[in-house]
Image (tube, rainbow, N blue to C red):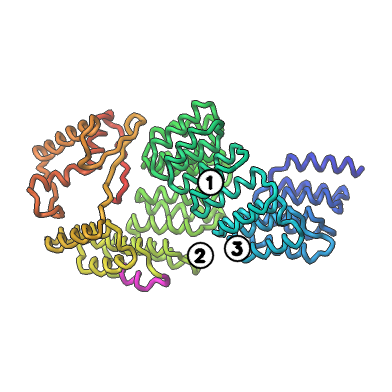
């Protein structure tokens, strides 16, 4: 009877994908008298602790009812905690196992508990665990050794990581890959290349580790060369290239690798889809985003929460809130905190403050508790919509009602809230009273507001603070120069410009990007003439002439340097990169089409 019941139990477990299903199997185990069977209990625990999401709390309770837990059941719970948001709980279970004299730890015990130490970047605990592994003679075990390498790397100790690796008698390819990762983790690109060159054998993961390392180090050309050198490329190889180039602002290259992936007949995975959608969002590539949306629906990928969230973000940043809301409303299952926050952020950036507040209350009603990122979106919405009272109210409620301690980003939102409303002195006083040291971003927000509202006196105070925190930022000098220029203080403008020259500071050139017929075009003011830029300049000259003749438009030139001719001043403000991009869009797009411009600098 018991063998039949055990067989049925195994079949039920194999098909159980939710905690509810696991509870039903657990009830069957009790009913059939298998609750004292260590093997069955171990399998049930494995599903709760590792295989089923959000079931770790149930695994803990289940473990407490196992009369004589063996090393497998201890290891399973340690593993579950090590991979969770609370890896410190792994140590409690490990200590309990050490107290149980009948259950000595094995290689898996140390591998899992070392992973917890790595995830916590707890060097002190990692060292103690290394000593324990030495005591049991398990430190040279390839599984333990590999995890030790990873642990030391996460703690920033590449020297110790390589020392552990060198002591391994027969390191396998996983161990080699771990030490390459360790070098990259500690920014030792040359060391990673040296280890990669010495590898006696490489698998696809080895090449992918190098690709990911180069990308994180910003070595895009080295990554591209290595990718071309690879004999066999998999989905991870392509997704690494797509995400890496997108993250570094090389959107055309990201799109190119995505197209190549499809030409190779591979199915895009979760990482490649979210990566290419991120590129669409940052580049304002709305048309390409729509094509991806069609593919996601057709391929049945809409159920992947991260992909739906990335799609929502793409539509939001491309300015199409209607499509973003459609994606949000049609998301399958219960919406995650990321989904709610993404929709709030999308509405916020378009100035829909009241709608964000309404969505926030709807989220609360659904039982989803707001986190720190949610409050950033909420305060950002209040700032952009000019909802000062509501913003102040939510900021004060963060800790009192929601138990969320405001961090520097929330204080930055409040400074922006006051600054946008023109309450500069209140914003300055708020910064001075902050419980933590304000960073350069917060001071820069206030400096930008001083520029907009022409408060020269406060701007000089703020600039003094910024010079102590980030003296080499050219943008701060430019803002102060603009404030002086508007006030007509040309000697001060010249002084700021001389200071920039003396410090070899160069202004970041502004560029603007537009998507036309699924191709991205980038414009920079005063760039060398090309066929594309000539079309833009010609159309812009036509528009400016029409504005002058028919609309009586005169360019605002008071912030332009006084020591150039009036015509040059007008050209300086009339030929900005965003105007060139708009002109090109008018020249090439059909009437009635939306023109979307993406800029690298804040307007």
Which circle, 3 or 2, is nearer the viewer?
3
Q: Position of residue 63 (x, y in %)?
A: 77, 57
Residue extending furthest toward the left: 565
Tag nearer the camera, 1 or 3 = 1
Magenta residues (range): 427-436
- Within-10-Å neighbours for mark 1: few <14, some 14–19, many 20+: few
User: Would you name the residue on which mark 3 appears?
Assistant: 122
- Residue plotted at (26% across, 56% down): 505
Q: Which residue is the site of mark 1?
A: 194
Q: Residue furthest right?
A: 1
Residue drawn at x 59%, y 54% is: 162
User: For residue 430: magenta?
Assistant: yes
Above or below — where is 551 with respect to 107?
Answer: above
Residue placed at 22% from the left, 58% from the top?
Answer: 500
Q: Which one is earlier in the sequence, the residue at label 3 or at label 2? A: 3
Residue 200 at what x, y percent from top left?
62, 40
On the image, which quarter does residue 286 sit in?
top left
**Residue 210 seen from this side:** yes
- What is the number of the mark on residue 404? 2
Spatial CA distance of label 1 from label 2 is 46 Å
Left-right relation of 534 to 438: left
Is 595 positioned to the left or the right of 122 in the image? left
Q: Earlier in the sequence, mark 1 or mark 2?
A: 1
Instruction: Say if the magenta span includes residue 350.
Output: no
Q: Residues within 10 Å of mark 2 (few under 14, many from 20)?
A: some
CA–CA distance between discs 1 and 3? Answer: 28 Å
């Amino acid at each position: 009877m018991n063998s039949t019941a055990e067989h049925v139990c195994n079949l039920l477990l194999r098909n159980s994908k939710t905690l509810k299903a696991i509870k039903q199997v657990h009830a069957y185990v009790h009913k059939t008298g298998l609750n004292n069977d260590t093997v069955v209990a171990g399998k049930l625990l494995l599903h709760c602790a590792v295989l089923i999401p959000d079931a770790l709390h149930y695994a803990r309770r289940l473990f407490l009812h196992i009369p004589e837990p063996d090393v497998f059941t201890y290891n399973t719970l340690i593993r579950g905690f090590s991979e969770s948001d609370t890896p410190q709980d792994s140590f409690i279970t490990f200590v309990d196992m050490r107290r149980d004299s009948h259950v000595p730890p094995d290689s898996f015990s140390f591998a899992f508990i070392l992973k917890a130490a790595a995830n916590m970047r707890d060097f002190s605990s990692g060292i103690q665990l290394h000593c324990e592994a030495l005591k049991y003679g398990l430190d040279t075990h390839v599984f333990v050794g590999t995890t030790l390498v990873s642990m030391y790397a996460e703690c920033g100790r590449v020297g110790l990581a390589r020392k552990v690796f060198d002591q391994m008698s027969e390191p396998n390819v996983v161990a080699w890959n771990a030490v390459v990762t360790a070098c990259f983790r500690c920014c030792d690109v040359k060391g990673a290349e040296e280890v990669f060159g010495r590898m006696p054998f490489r698998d696809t993961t080895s090449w992918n580790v190098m690709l990911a390392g180069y990308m994180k180090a910003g070595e895009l050309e080295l990554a591209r060369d290595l990718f071309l050198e690879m004999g066999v490329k998999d989905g991870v190889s392509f997704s690494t290239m797509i995400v890496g180039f997108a993250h570094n602002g090389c959107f055309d290259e990201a799109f190119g690798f995505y197209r190549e992936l499809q030409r190779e007949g591979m199915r895009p995975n979760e990482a490649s889809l979210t990566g290419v959608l991120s590129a669409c969002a940052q580049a304002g590539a709305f048309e390409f985003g729509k094509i991806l949306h069609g593919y996601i629906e057709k391929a049945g990928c809409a159920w992947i929460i991260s992909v739906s969230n990335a799609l929502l973000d793409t539509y939001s940043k491309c300015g199409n809130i209607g499509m973003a809301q459609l994606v949000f409303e049609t998301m399958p299952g219960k919406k995650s905190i990321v989904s709610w926050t993404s929709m709030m952020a999308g509405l916020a950036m378009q100035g829909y403050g009241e709608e964000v507040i309404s969505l926030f209350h709807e989220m609360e009603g659904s039982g989803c508790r707001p986190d720190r990122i949610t409050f950033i979106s909420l305060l950002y919405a209040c700032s952009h919509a000019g909802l000062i009272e509501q913003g102040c109210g939510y900021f004060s409620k963060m800790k009192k009602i929601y138990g969320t301690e405001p961090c520097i980003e929330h204080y930055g939102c409040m400074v922006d809230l006051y600054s946008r409303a023109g309450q500069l002195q209140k914003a300055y006083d708020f910064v001075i009273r902050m419980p933590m040291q304000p960073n350069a971003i917060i001071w820069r927000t206030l400096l930008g507001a001083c520029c907009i509202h022409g408060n020269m006196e406060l701007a000089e105070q703020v600039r003094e603070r910024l010079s102590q925190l980030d003296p080499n930022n050219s943008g701060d000098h430019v803002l102060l120069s603009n404030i002086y220029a508007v006030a007509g203080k040309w000697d001060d403008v010249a002084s700021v410009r001389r200071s920039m020259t003396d410090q070899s500071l160069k202004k970041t050139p502004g560029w603007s990007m537009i998507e036309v017929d699924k191709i991205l075009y980038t414009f920079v003011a005063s760039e060398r003439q090309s066929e594309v830029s000539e079309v833009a300049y010609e159309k812009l000259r036509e528009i400016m002439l029409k504005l002058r003749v028919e609309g009586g438009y005169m360019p605002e030139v008071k912030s332009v340097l006084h020591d150039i001719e009036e015509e040059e001043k007008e050209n300086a403000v009339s030929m900005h990169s965003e105007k060139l991009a708009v002109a090109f869009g008018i020249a090439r797009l059909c009437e009635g089409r939306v023109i979307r411009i993406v800029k690298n600098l804040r307007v």
